[in-house]
Image (spheres, rainbow, N blue to C red):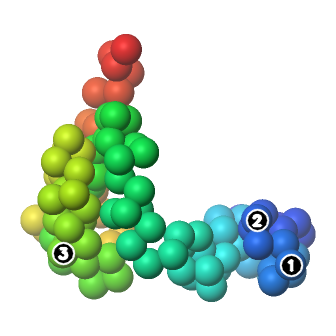
Amino acid sequence: MTASSTTICHHTSSCTPVTHVPRPAPLLVCAQVHYGFLEDAALLEGIERIRHIPCVAVQGANDLICPPSTALELHRAWPEMELRVCAAAGHSMYSAQLQAEVLRATDAFRTLE
């Protein structure tokens, strides 16, 4: 993987260019430093603004980083969102079960009008 030498964070006053990590990492680091770009409960409090947008959330049941309880809380606030919980998956995007569900969800969006 090649290194990035540009800042991709929108918090430009507090982030500096990253030159020693793979390309996806600067965004991840920025998200972690800035609490995922959203204040606590911002998504839940603003759910009415996005309720009309079709959404499928794919969650690993054994995810210790983003616990399933957070996905369930979001689903309770946004019941129109389809929640798919993968019983054998954790947080890794390399989980075959998570990958299959994400592909199934994105394939379904192909026919969305």
- Do residues under tags 2 and 1 come within 8 Å of each other at their CB atoms? no
User: Label 3 is placed on what type of residue?
Assistant: Ser
The residue pinned by badge 3 equals 69
Q: Few, some or many C-alpha atoms within 10 Å of disc 2 (few <14, some 14-19, many ≥20)?
A: few
Question: Quick one: SS at disc 2?
Answer: loop
Name the quadrant containing residue 96.
bottom left
Residue at 26 percent across and 54 percent down: it is 58
Q: How far from the left and from the top, in percent, is residue 112?
A: 34, 19
Looking at the image, tell me whether mark 1 or mark 3 is earlier in sequence order.
1
- Do residues under tags 3 and 2 come within 8 Å of each other at their CB atoms? no
Q: How far from the left and from the top, in percent, is residue 5?
A: 89, 69
Q: In which quadrant of the rendered image does the N terminus lie? A: bottom right
Q: In which quadrant of the rendered image does the C terminus lie? A: top left
Above or below residue 62? Residue 10 is: above
Is 91 in front, or is 112?
112
Q: Few, some or many C-alpha atoms within 10 Å of disc 3 (few <14, some 14-19, many ≥20)?
A: few
Residue at 75 percent across and 67 percent down: it is 9
Residue at 22 percent across and 57 percent down: it is 77
Residue 43 left/right relative to 98:
right
Above or below residue 5? Residue 97 is: above
Name the quadrant containing residue 81.
top left
Q: How far from the left and from the top, in percent, is residue 31?
A: 59, 74
Disc 3 and disc 2: Cα gap in Å? Answer: 29 Å
Residue at 37 percent across and 63 percent down: it is 45
Residue 13's label in the rendered image is 1
Q: How far from the left and from the top, in percent, is residue 53?
A: 37, 36
Disc 2 and disc 1: Cα gap in Å? Answer: 9 Å
Is 70 in front, or is 102?
70
The residue pinned by badge 2 equals 10
Q: Is residue 90 visible?
A: no
User: Label 2 is placed on what type of residue?
Assistant: His
